[in-house]
Amino acid sequence: MQETKHFIGGSWIAAGARQTFAAVSPATGDVLAQIAQGDVADADAAVRAASAARGVLAKMTAWERARMCLRIADAIEARKPALARTLTLDQGKPYHAEALGEVEHAAASFRNCAEQIKWLETAVMPVEAPSKRVFSIRQPRGVYAIVTPWNFPYMIAAEYLAPGLAAGNAIVWVPAPTTSLCAVELTRAIQEADLPPGALNLVTGPGPVVGDAIVAHPGTAGVGFTGSPATGEQIARRAAGKPCLLELGGNGPTIILDDADLDTAAAATALGCFFNAGQVCCATERILVHPAVHDAVVEKLAERARAVKLGDPLAEGTTMGPLNNEPTAEKSDRHVRDAVERGATIVVGGKRASGFATSLYYQPTVIDGMTTEMAGHREETFGPVAKVMTVASDDEALRIADDSDLGLVSAVFTRDLKRAFRFSEALRTGIVVVNDFTDYWELHIPFGGASGKRSGIGRIGGRHALMEMTDLKTIVLDVG
Ligand code: NAD
């Protein structure tokens, strides 16, 4: 049985307390490895190793760091099948339909930042004083504390590690416990790219222990976190005074208007509900449908749900694997039960699937007759549950879409340009997608939550993350 270690200062080091926890596959129930269970002393050692490396990284030119990022992308791509297999076994997502793509996406993140860092220009400012010349430069912030979730263990990590390293920061990374084996494998790939020792450090273990320790540590200068709003808020308090890039939850409303192309809307909406078994921050969570098209939309969504191939995530043809962990599966159970008790109807699915190696396989589900007091409307479900509610008018659709403390991504389906603009401008989410699914995103597009909601602070995505993860320094020269 493989026993993993922390990666600190360029070496693999056993957890100080010599404790481990099991990485159990949600797909098979097998123990895949014993993972090093870090403590505060391990986190502290990692921050110290990163602090020692920060000067080396900061001195590298943007071109040198860009080449380092390209080497990382090559190393990830060279291990694509093995990384994808670990992802499928450790996280649960289907190998062919999704895991290979996530590995490609992680590599592309490094390529993207390698390009963007070269062109991160700053300004020379005209000033009033005749003897002064004023300009700005972007500098790395120092040591970044990065804490990531389990739904995209490579992709979300790369969304921080790529801009962080490209910008010249040293990093201490704490991944989610249930996908720590993925983090170890990704770090092994990155290690091959000849980074300065201490540039990237990995500490595995419980978030409230090692995650908290790096976030609150006086040696870290900035924090990048993706996860739930409650943890994000706790982290923001613990990191008080440090720049925080927080990507938190969503409750993605998708509005299907009476003039929508229903085949396109149903196909995109179903993908938004069932991709990664719904465990996506920008998943389609609430489907708000005009009464004139309600029956047709429900029928088409049900057809799509029945077409999902739930099964062995390593098998070709499987489009949905198990959920990653029991609390997530229990949340889907609770939301379905609550909806039914309050009068909603299950059209397809509605429970865990039987006959699999674990109880984490969940039937692709469509529920009709949702109302605003139901838990599945009020909270993010994070499971493969399409929840349909009828809305009487455009105004009501806007009001109910906004009836959420979250505001990450929304979508609207209409053929009318004026309605498209009205919704795009009025919806309080960081991204509005017209005529496609809520998950639509490319690496360089700014991604994050709307202000006044609990979906996060700041923007990831290429250049935007580079700006978040650097300090803007103003230099004043007196030449008089
Ligand atoms: P979570 O908040 O429970 O955990 C996220 C990470 O934080 C894990 O690594 C965990 O170990 C760590 N953690 C937990 N408590 C901590 C603490 N006190 N201090 C420091 N670290 C701590 O979230 P999750 O259940 O793993 O992920 C699902 C959530 O993430 C959903 O709400 C989802 O919407 C959100 N998410 C957001 C995005 C985005 O880009 N906005 C992307 C993916 C997931």
Image (spheres, rainbow, N blue to C red):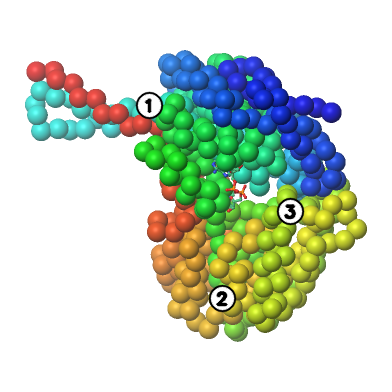
Q: Earlier in the sequence, mark 1 or mark 3?
A: 1
Q: Nearer the viewer, residue 54 or 319?
A: 54
Q: Which mark is residue 480?
A: none
Q: Amino acid at mark 2?
A: Glu
Q: Earlier in the sequence, mark 2 or mark 1?
A: 1
Of the residues tagged 2 and 1, which is closer to the observer?
A: 2
Q: Position of residue 85 (x, y in %)?
A: 79, 37
Q: Secondary structure at mark 1?
A: strand
The residue at the point 8 percent across, 26 percent down is: 130
Q: Can residue 72 be seen?
A: no
Residue identifier under label 2: 373
* Cα gap from disc 1 to disc 3, whole angstroms: 42 Å
In this view, the residue farthest toward the right is 355
Q: Amino acid at mark 3?
A: Glu
Give the quarter of the image for residue 86.
top right
Q: Is mark 3 within 8 Å of ligand 1?
A: no
Q: Earlier in the sequence, mark 3 or mark 2?
A: 3
Give the quarter of the image for residue 279.
bottom right
Q: Which mark is residue 326?
A: 3
